[in-house]
Every structure is written in C-alpha cells, then in structure tokens.
Amino acid sequence: MTLVDDSILLIKKAQEAENNNRLREAIELYTGAAKLLLESSKVENPEVAAHREQQAKSMFTIAENLKEKLHNMENSKENKIDASGGKGEINNPDKEQDMNIEAEQSDQNQLQKESMQVNNENKVIKEQDLNMKNTPEDQEFLDAMGIDNINIPDISFDDVAGLDMVKDEVKVKILLPLVKKDLAKVYDISAGGGILMYGPPGNGKTFIARAIAHEAHAYFININPSNLLNQWFGRFEKNIETLFRYASKHSPAVLFFDEIDAITPKRAKTNSSYMKRAVPALLSEMDGIVARKHTLLIIGATNNPWDIDEAFLRPGRFGERIYIPPPDVKARKLLFEMYLKNAIHDEVDYDYLSSITENFSAADIKYVCNKTKENVFKEATKTDVVRNITENDILEVVNASKPSVNNELLAKYIKFRDA
C-alpha cells in the first residue's frame, strides 16, 4: 500500500471515532493522516504535491478544531458541576437534566457540522477510494490475469543506470504533459496516450516503465498479453474492455503491455480470424483514451517492433516510439558497480570492464556479475577460505560469455527507428 492508501484508512477510522464521540482518538488519527499526506507530497509533480499538501493542511485543521471542541466540552462539564453545587444556584434536578439534554444536543449538532466538513475536505480522497473498489467481475478478471497490489512504484529515474538520452526523451514526450497539465491544455497537448518502447531483450524496458509510473506518480498495471489470450478463450474483446475500465478507476495509471507484439500482429500476415478480431478491439480501446476523463498512459514493450500491425503505429496510438538500446559504456560501468557493490572484492577497473563488453545487454552484465560471485562462493565452500573477488574472476566469466546483441540486430533496430 502507498502512503496515500494508508492516509485514507486513517481518515476513515478518524471519521468513525469522531461520529462515536471518541474525540481524542479522532484527533490522533486525523493528525497521523495529515503527516502521511505530507510525506506523500514529496514528489516531482507540483500539482500532485500541492494537492496533497492542501489535504494535509485540512486534516491538521480538523484535528485542531476537534481539540478546541474537546476543550470546550470539558470546560462545560466543569461549569455544570460548579453550577449544580455552587452558591446562589438552586439545585434543581429537572433543570439540570434539561441543561444536560440541551448541551448534548448542541454537541451532536456541532459534531454533525464538523463531520460534514470532514466529508467535504476529503471528497477527492474518498471518491478515489470508492472508484478503486472492484466489482465481482473485475476481481474475477484480475485474479485470472494475475494482477494484484496495484500501486505507485518506488523505482525512480535515479535507479536507471545510464540511458540519459532515453530519460530525457521520456521526460519531454511523456512526463511533461502529465506534470504540466495546465500548460499542456493551453497548447492543446493531451496527457496520456500510447508509447511503444522497443529494443533488444534484457535492457530494462519493464524497469523503465515502472520508473515512468513513479515519476508521473501513477499506478502501474503490468499485463502479460498471453494471459489476455489464454484466459477464457474467445473473450479477448471483453477482456480488453474490462482491463481498460479497471485501469480508468486507478487514474492516473500506466497500463504496461510486455511483449505487446503477441496481441498486435500484422493482420495481413496472420490467418487467425480470432486475432483479426482481437486487433480492432484493442485499437478501439486505445482510440477512446483521449475521450476518457481519466488519464491513462499505455506503454507497450517489444523486442520485435517490425511485427506490429501498422495501425498501432499511427499518431494517437503508439505514435510515440522510444528506442531502448543496449547500455552504453557509461551505463555498463554503472551496472558493474551496482551488481558487485554488495560482494567483497578487490579494486576493479570498471572502465576497462565496460570497454570490453560492447553490445552486452543489462541482463548480460547482471549474469556476468552473478556468475562471478557464484564461482567464488563455490570455491570458498570447498576450501573454507574467504577471499575477495578479483578482477581476474570477472574477466574469466566475461571471456566465456557472448553478448546477446549483435551488430546485425542493432542495425535492424536503427532502421526501424529512422523509418
């Protein structure tokens, strides 16, 4: 659960405590919710940050009002005791009972008034919470798709090694319209839409998609296209409709399709009547993104962009295409450092390692580092001698490995990019 989710739960508990006149408990819960909202406002999106800061301020205000109310109620009780036993006041049981009933009614009226204030202050939060509830049909679908724990990823661009040009491209093409919504409206720029990320396997397309969701402060929904095809065969059209409706409930959301070419094949090259119906169903949902009130960002990832039906590559669908290349020399150095940092090792010439691993994917470098650590660990279990990993240990694995990407394949990606 996210900080926002936790704050929503606290607010609900606070409202329940307040309605049952447990004011001390309500004050503590509202204050806790405010602190969580303040913590959740530490995001790059200024609109989201300002909105959450305002919500936090409202929670603090409600807590302060309840503190004042509690103080007045306690003083009122003390005054009643003094009045009933003090000089110059007739001790009339009927009058005292009337006073108590009147005070009780006044307290109830004030509580109702403040409860209405709570509801108004938190209308946005409560509506978001209600929208995210699943229907039985939604839940059946999500269970079949293996989708759970929808949240905003904690992976940021800072966690993406290298790929500075890719990150800059993502910020300009994708994030700015989401972050600068008011300015985007002035220039009639739509937030959301479709993006195709393509490139050789093992270079972190899914990782980058998660980072995009984090930077956009959007919920991340990861879809395996094969599940859409395999579950309830013949119901792809209904499945895709359910998926987009569910994603809209979590707006702003990133809907991520890995290996999207599995459900977007070129219709001219397939004999499957089923796939010829499936492709238009997905196209129809994508065309409806702009008309939706909710912000949806559709990211498709593929190793084979040339196999995708041309209709998906038109503007308004996957019109934005971003090439995710193998890590460059700078990124390879960062990857070696990252994957070896938690293991004991001698001083390593990372610049040299990165220079001799051209065309190695991020997954290739991860394999080299893990295999090296495994080799030295196995040796230590046999000799009972703990030693540092050396550069030679790493080079031994590098020399025995081949990059998963070759120049011919890279040329094919470059040709698609420049087409």
Image: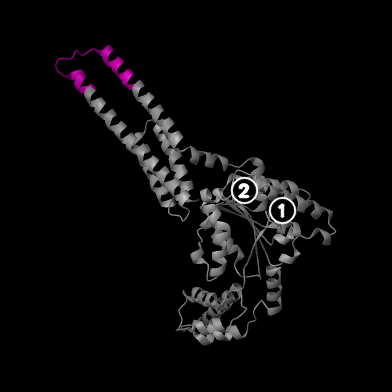
* Amino acid found under the numbered disc labelled 1: Leu
**Residue 217 in sight:** no
Most common SS among magenta residues: helix
Q: Position of residue 411 (x, y in %)?
A: 70, 76
Q: Disc 2 versus disc 1: distance between alpha carbons?
A: 15 Å
First in sequence: mark 2 vs mark 1 = 1
Q: Residue at x 52, y 50 (%)?
A: 183
Q: Residue at x 41, y 38 (%)?
A: 14
Give the colour scheme shown. one colour
Q: Which sits in the foreground, 42 or 145?
A: 42
Q: Above or below — where is 200 with respect to 390? A: above
User: Which residue corresponds to mark 2?
Assistant: 247
**Residue 227 in sight:** yes
Q: Which residues are magenta?
A: 80-104
Q: Is residue 169 left or right of residue 102?
A: right
Q: Above or below — where is 152 with respect to 377? A: above
